[in-house]
Amino acid sequence: MAEACVLSESTDGVLRLTLNRPDKLNALNRQTLTELHAAFDRARTDSSARVVVITGAGSKAFIAGADISELAGLTPVEALEFSRFGQALMTRIERLGKPVIAAVNGFALGGGMELAMACHLRVASATSKWGQPEITLGVPPGFGGTQRLARLAGRAVALDLCLTGRTIDAERALALGIVHSVHSPDQLGAAVDVLAAQLAASAPHALRGILDAILIGSEGGLDVGLDYESSAFAVCVSTGDMREGTSAFLERRKPAFTGC
Ligand code: COA
């Protein structure tokens, strides 16, 4: 059996996925994309996974993009299918209904930046490098980069990075709103652990309401988003977690959310 391209480990409500091709800077080949689809599909229905963290093996790269050795031999029909397969993965991550944190420990280029942008939170090493260098290969981004970068950081930034293919550092990515926080490489793991633990201890239905409402509202417009928000709010009021959260406040104790 081929060695796993994606390692999976679950503790205390946190599912950790590690891209495991460090020799190839964790480039996304078809096998890795297939394993990621399966891992996120399992995460969706696994109630013990309250939050997902994804990172890259090794100290150099989060993901250095789609695997160029596979790209090089694609026919147009295969390229269309490859692009759609990658896009479907990014959409699957974005719509998981549970928070996904990208722990970006190095190069986040091409498909790596696209995958990080599909995650809900991006926590970056100060040494990470970000970019959409596909133009240097003679193609546009193919896993949603033109769309999500424009939504995340605006059209001007998306045009700049996609047209030039230039790479930016973590501080610049932070200033542009692409990254949520930047940490020294030796502090990245601890910062991600703290964030993941906080989210894993939160009420899952409320987290889902927030994730879906923000996504639905930003894609479907204010009225659609407000409608969804009201429904999510009403559904959450029926949960045991809402009773626990309000009781804990009134009793001056920490809430223990169970997902009921
Ligand atoms: N696809 C396939 N293999 C890749 C890869 C990718 N996207 N990115 C890196 N690798 C491989 C290299 O071929 C090399 O393999 P080898 O040792 O068998 O020759 C290995 O990973 C290490 O990469 P290398 O280029 O030697 O490291 P570097 O430190 O000199 O450069 C980068 C690092 C990230 C700047 C450089 O690897 C790079 O530009 N990668 C491609 C980025 C890209 O264009 N991504 C978009 C793809 S659509």
Image: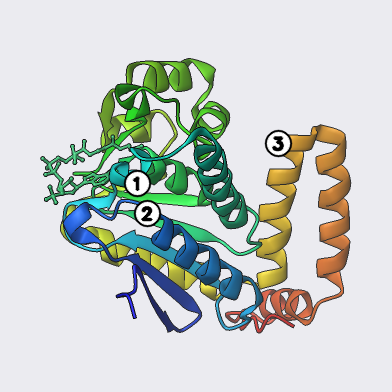
- Crowdedness of circle 2 by 10 Å Cα count: few (<14), some, many (20+)? many
Q: Estimate the x, y position of residue 187 in percent, counting from the top left.
A: 22, 60
Q: Would you say the beta carbon of the disc 2 residue lies within 8 angstroms of ligand 1?
A: yes
Of residues 4 and 245, the one nearer the viewer is: 4
Is residue 239 left or right of 24 when viewed as pictured? right
Q: Earlier in the sequence, mark 2 or mark 1?
A: 2
Residue depth check, mark 3 versus mark 2: number of the one nearer the observer: 2
Q: Earlier in the sequence, mark 3 or mark 2?
A: 2
Q: Which residue is mark 1?
A: 70
Residue depth check, mark 2 versus mark 1: number of the one nearer the observer: 1
Q: Is residue 207 above or below residue 201?
A: above
Quarter of the rendered image showing ligand 1: top left
Cα–Cα gap, marks 3 and 1: 34 Å
User: Disc 3 on helix, strand or loop?
Assistant: helix
Cα–Cα gap, marks 3 and 2: 31 Å
Q: Amino acid at mark 3?
A: Ser
- Answer whether residue 114 is visible to the viewer in this image: yes
Q: Which residue is mark 2?
A: 29
Q: Estimate the x, y position of residue 239 in percent, counting from the top left.
A: 81, 77
Q: Amino acid at mark 2?
A: Asn
Q: Estimate the x, y position of residue 242 in percent, counting from the top left.
A: 76, 74
Q: Estimate the x, y position of residue 79 in percent, counting from the top left.
A: 50, 38
Task: Say how the picture is coloured.
Answer: rainbow
- Answer whether residue 195 is visible to the viewer in this image: no
How many badges with numbers are in the image? 3
Q: Which residue is mark 3?
A: 218
Residue at image position (58%, 44%) is 84
Residue at image position (66%, 54%) is 211
Cα–Cα gap, marks 2 and 1: 7 Å
User: Disc 2 on helix, strand or loop?
Assistant: loop
